[in-house]
Structure formats: structure tokens, C-alpha cells
């Protein structure tokens, strides 16, 4: 069967390509999925689209947030033919998905029919945000600072708020602060971070969360966290940064900080003995948040576009960050 897919071919260059996908002789852990919508990851994908991430070569097939329907499947797939599913898969109209594929990732989950498929493409963003929140130790009365109000940053801040924390979002782009406020975050700061933190808490933040992946911001998180507090590294550091690291390490040491790495692969996909958390459990939480409109994902979706406009989409997300949040590809006409 014919499939169309997005391919990054060079720095800032991307195209819609065409290929044939075989649907014959499926292995037990494979499925053929017809895409409905997929969401661009403004973090991971942009790092590849503009060569911010080192150690890979073009061409690259980006993407890992897709909603579609199973048209054929192997016996080990935990969904049925015809089911709508959320799946970690690259941007394509038709995908031959396999659970052991390291690029596509391990997650495929059945979606209820009453969940909006466009909104459901953001499930992966919620899974990342949940990871950071669940790994930190929260108590009533804590003050949490979330640094970086991109999509995951806003979602992270809102999840902490749901747990009863006093949450402050920090981002130099005022428009991002405005989006966060429209989605329910009361406190945002776009400049003079230190002064604003001191007004709220003389001791500093109980928990600081970096969602930018920028080394300087991580250093600021350590600076603004109170003694015996927590600094959560939710963003993925990618760009080189030169500095004397000793003052940073000294602050971590002298302030008795707990620094938590929150890369999104610390829990099993399905429940296992000895672990309450799993990706499946977090998936159900994320779906409920969307279905019940506890978090209004629609406010994050700036555009739903034809995949042939992929190059413009990456450009806009990279260079119009004050205007664009999430961009979703519509595959229904392919």
C-alpha cells in the first residue's frame, strides 16, 4: 500500500515523500496503522530539524505522537483491528509499526471513540509532563517554579497546580505566559526572575523544574532552589555550553539539593511487580485529563495543517515561538 511520510533532509529542509508499505506476513508484534493526525514535537523534532541535537545524520524521519486506526495486526498487539489507537510512530499516512523498534518506541494504546483524535496527539506531551511531576516529592504548601512555558512546560505547571502546589511559570516570551494563564496558571513571570521569587518566598523555590534543556537555565534552577529543595531536569540538554562547573556543584552540595533526572523512560510500559507507575497507567491519566477537559489541550494547538506544508511548520515552530505552540498534521486525505 502507498504511504506518504515526512522526511528531514538537511538543516531546515523537509519534504513529503512517498513509499510502498507491505501489509503482508505481519509478525506477532506488528500492526498496520492508518494515520488520522500526528503532532510535531517542538522539542525533540526541532532539535533534529535544525541540527541542535548532535550525533545523527540526515535524512531523518521525525515524529512520535500519532493517532490512527489499526487495519491489520499481529496477535501480540493489545488492540483490535479497527480500533483507534495512540502510537509512538513517525509522521506518515500509513505505518508498519512494531513494538520492538527503537526509533518508533514501544507505546501503542487503544483510544476511546469519544476522545477527540486531534487533542489525543498531545498525549505524549502529557506523559512527559507526568514523568517529571511524579518523580518529584510534593507536599501541600510547596512552591514550584517551572522554567520554560513551551507545551510541556505549561502542562507540567498545570499538573503541579492540580496537586495543590503554588506554581510559578517562567518564560521570557510574554505570549507563552499569556497562553499559560488562559489555560489556568495564575502566576507567570517573564523577567526579573530572582526578584519575583524573593517576593513570593524568601527561602527560594521548594521545587524548580527545567523544561528548556538549556544549561544556563538549569544553573538558574539550582540558584533559585531553597536549601534541601529539589531541582527536576525535565528538558533534554542538547547544546554545548562552556562554564566553570564548580560553583554549580558547590551549590548543589552546600544546599543539600536533590537533582532529579526525569527523562521519559524511567517506568515500565505495562504494570510489573514492584512498580505502581507505568506508561499504561500514565496514559489512562492523560486520556482522562483530556476527556474531562481538566486540561484544555485545544488551547495549545495553533494549527492543523496538510503534511505537504511540513517545512513551513518546522520554520514557524523554530522562529515564531511567540505565535506557535503545537502544530498537528492532518492525514485524513492521504
Image (cartoon, rainbow, N blue to C red):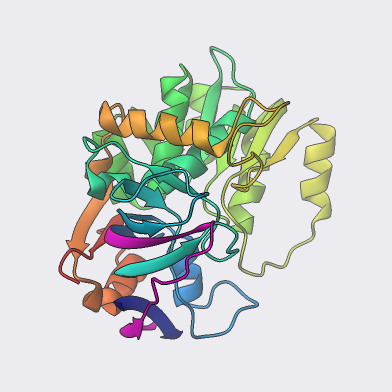
The answer to whether residue 243 is left or right of residue 55 is: right
- The quarter in which the N terminus is drawn is bottom left
- The quarter in which the C terminus is drawn is bottom left
Please state the horizontal and vertical placement of residue 58, each as a whole percent of the image.
52, 85
Query: In which quarter of the view is residue 141 placed?
Result: top right
Query: In which quarter of the view is residue 61 placed?
Result: bottom left
The answer to whether residue 226 is left or right of residue 201 is: right
The answer to whether residue 232 shows anywhere in this view is yes
Note whether 202 is above or below 36 in the view shown.
above
Give the residues drawn in magenta, as a range: 13-36
Please state the horizontal and vertical placement of residue 38, each as a whole percent of the image.
32, 59
Please state the horizontal and vertical placement of residue 173, each as a whole percent of the image.
35, 53
Note whether 309 is above or below 142 in the view shown.
below
The answer to whether residue 40 shows anywhere in this view is no
Which of these two is toward me, 149 or 302? 302
Q: Residue at x 49, y 51 (%)?
A: 75
- Most extreme residue toward the left is 333
Amino acid at each position: 500500500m502507498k504511504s506518504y511520510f515526512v522526511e528531514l533532509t538537511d538543516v531546515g529542509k523537509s519534504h513529503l515523500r512517498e513509499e510502498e508499505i507491505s501489509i503482508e506476513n505481519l509478525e506477532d508484534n506488528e500492526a498496520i496503522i492508518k494515520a488520522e493526525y500526528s503532532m510535531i514535537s517542538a522539542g525533540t523534532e526541532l532539535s533534529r530539524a535544525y541540527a541542535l541535537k548532535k550525533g545523527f545524520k540526515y535524512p531523518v524521519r521525525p515524529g512520535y505522537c500519532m493517532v490512527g486506526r489499526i487495519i491489520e495486526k499481529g496477535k501480540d498487539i493489545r488492540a483490535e483491528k479497527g480500533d483507534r489507537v495512540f502510537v509512538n510512530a513517525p509522521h506518515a499516512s500509513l505505518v508498519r509499526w512494531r513494538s520492538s523498534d527503537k526509533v518508533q518506541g514501544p507505546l501503542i494504546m487503544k483510544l476511546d471513540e469519544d476522545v477527540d483524535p486531534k487533542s489525543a496527539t498531545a498525549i505524549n506531551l502529557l506523559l512527559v509532563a507526568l514523568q517529571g511531576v511524579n518523580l518529584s516529592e510534593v507536599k501541600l504548601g510547596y512552591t514550584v517554579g517551572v522554567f520554560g512555558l513551551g507545551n510541556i512546560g505549561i502542562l507540567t505547571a498545570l499538573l503541579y497546580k492540580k496537586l495543590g502546589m503554588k506554581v510559578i511559570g517562567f518564560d521570557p516570551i510574554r505570549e507563552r505566559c499569556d497562553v499559560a494563564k488562559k489555560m489556568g496558571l495564575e502566576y507567570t513571570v517573564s523577567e526579573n526572575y530572582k526578584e519575583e521569587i524573593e517576593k513570593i518566598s524568601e527561602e527560594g523555590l521548594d521545587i524548580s523544574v527545567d523544561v528548556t534543556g538549556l544549561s544556563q537555565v538549569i544553573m538558574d534552577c539550582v540558584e533559585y532552589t531553597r536549601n534541601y529543595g529539589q531541582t527536576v531536569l525535565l528538558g533534554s540538554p542538547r547544546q554545548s555550553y562552556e562554564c566553570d562547573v564548580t560553583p554549580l556543584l558547590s551549590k548543589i552540595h552546600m544546599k543539600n539539593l536533590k537533582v532529579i533526572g526525569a527523562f521519559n523512560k524511567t517506568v515500565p510500559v505495562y504494570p510489573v511487580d514492584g512498580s505502581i507507575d507505568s506508561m499504561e497507567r500514565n496514559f489512562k491519566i492523560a486520556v482522562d485529563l483530556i476527556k474531562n477537559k481538566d486540561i484544555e489541550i485545544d488551547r495549545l494547538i495553533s494549527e492543523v495543517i496538510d503534511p505537504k506544508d511540513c517545512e513551513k511548520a518546522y520554520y514557524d515552530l523554530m522562529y515564531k515561538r511567540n505565535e506557535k505552540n503545537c502544530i498537528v498534521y492532518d492525514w485524513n486525505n492521504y
